[in-house]
Each structure stands twice: as C-alpha cells, then as structure tokens.
Image (cartoon, helix red, strand yellow):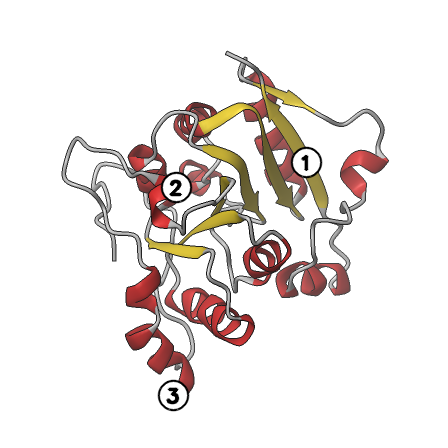
Amino acid sequence: MADRDANRPQLHGRRHGRRLRTGQRTLLAELLPQLRIHSPERGNHLDPPALFRPGTREVWLEIGFGAGEHLAWQAAHHPEVGLIGAEFFVNGIAGLLVQVAQHRLENVRIYEGDGRALLALLPDRSIARAFVLFPDPWPKTRHAKRRFIAPESVRGLARVLSDDGELRLASDEPAHLRWMLEHLTDSPDFAWQARRPQDWRERPPDWPPTRYEEKALKAGRRAAYLSFRRRPR
C-alpha cells in the first residue's frame, strides 16, 4: 500500500472487509502487480500518459472507486482513455480486478491508498476528468475533517485538472452534499454546470449506476449528481 502522511486526518476506517474468495486473492497476487502505480522518488511527479499504452488520448481519475463498477464501465466505454483509480479498501480493489479480468480492460491502473497522496504525485494539468462519487460522508461533526472534499483536496483537484476539465461528484447524504457544494462553489477554480434542478437530480447517461447507489435508492435516500468545470487559468 502507498505511504500515507501521518499528519493528515485519516479518511478511512478498516482496510479489509469480508474474507476474499480464492479467485479474488489470486487476482490481488497476480494481476494487481501489473496495474499497481508506484510512488516515484521523493520530489518527483508521476507521468500519467506513460502508465498506459501509446496513443492514449487523455487520462481520467477516480478517487475512492468502491467496488469499481463505475471505473470499469468508463474504461470499457472509453478504450482511448487511461483510467487511474485510487482506493484504500482491499475488497474494493479486488472487486475492480474481477471486472478488469472479465472484460480484459487494458486501460486501468490502480493506486492503493489515500487519494490526497495520489493528487500530490500528479503533475499540473495532467487529468482531463475526475470523479469523486459517494465518498464517505463522515456524518458526525467531530469526523468532518475526515471528509475527502476539503480545501486541500479542492486545490489539489484544481491543480491536476486541465483547463475546462470536468469534476464529477455524487452524494446521497444531504449534509454532505451541502458540504461539497460549499467547498466547490467557494473555489475560484471551479464552475458548477447545473442550470436547472434536473441537472443534479438526474444521473447523466454516461454515468452508470453502482451497487452502492442502488442500495441507497432502495433505502429511500436520493442521490445528487454534480458536475463542475475547471475554469481556464
């Protein structure tokens, strides 16, 4: 797993969930090493295009990809794009690896660890689209500092996104939704793209549902889908 900054509030709880199946453990041992992103030497940045095969048109980033359904869908529907996913939870990584193997996805790379650490490793203007979908809302007030969307990460996303690059956010928790909106609309670097309520109440057609989202909807929670553009520098 990638190193974490001990001075930062921890965003995550446990790293492991239920016991993995034999096939998942095999993928972690054999496939993950082929897709794993290693941190460069201190002071250096990653070279995102170099992580993928020649001809990759642009690179997209998903931070906290859960079980990987969204990231795998985007990779399958955009073979010309390189997809970088950051995830701390081992079971989520295993879930993505199953889909990569099943669909023979060659344009996926995985960073194991804190998405904030990955942002620090990426060069300026290196990401064309970023996703932060249904991050842990940490609903208790004393845990708010653990939320991923915060001034530091908003500045990091603004730095790595290319001009006019898109940032997509989603949440099914009202207080967390307000939190994300406040932080993004306070930033001079981002412009919210919503022009009517349907723009954030309805999931766009190129935004596939995930198991987490379907579970939330069945429980009566309503999801919101936010799209921001990185203002030109």
User: What amino acid is found at the position of numbered circle 2 in the picture?
Assistant: Pro
Residue 48's x, y, as percent? Answer: 37, 41
Residue 119 lies left or right of residue 97; in this view the side is: left
Numbered disc total: 3
Mark 2 burial class by Cα count in 10 Å: few <14, some 14-19, many 20+? some
Q: Mark 2 or mark 1: which comes first in sequence? A: 2
Vertical position of residue 28 compared to residue 157: above or below: below
User: What amino acid is found at the position of numbered circle 3 in the picture?
Assistant: Thr
> Could you tell me which residue is drawn at 31 percent across and 64 percent down?
34
Q: What numbered label is drawn on residue 40?
A: none
Residue 39 lies left or right of residue 60; in this view the side is: left
Q: What numbered label is drawn on residue 226?
A: 1
Disc number lying in front (1 or 3): 3
Residue 93's x, y, as percent? Answer: 42, 65
**Residue 97 quadrant:** bottom left
Q: Mark 1 or mark 3: which comes first in sequence? A: 3
Marks 3 and 2, how far apart at CA: 33 Å
Q: Mark 3 or mark 2: which comes first in sequence? A: 3
**Residue 200 quadrant:** top right
Does dot 1 land on a helix, a strand or a loop?
Answer: strand
Q: What numbered label is drawn on residue 22?
A: 3
Q: Which residue is mark 2?
A: 49
Residue 30 lies left or right of residue 148; in this view the side is: left
> Could you tell me which residue is drawn at 20 percent across and 33 percent down?
44
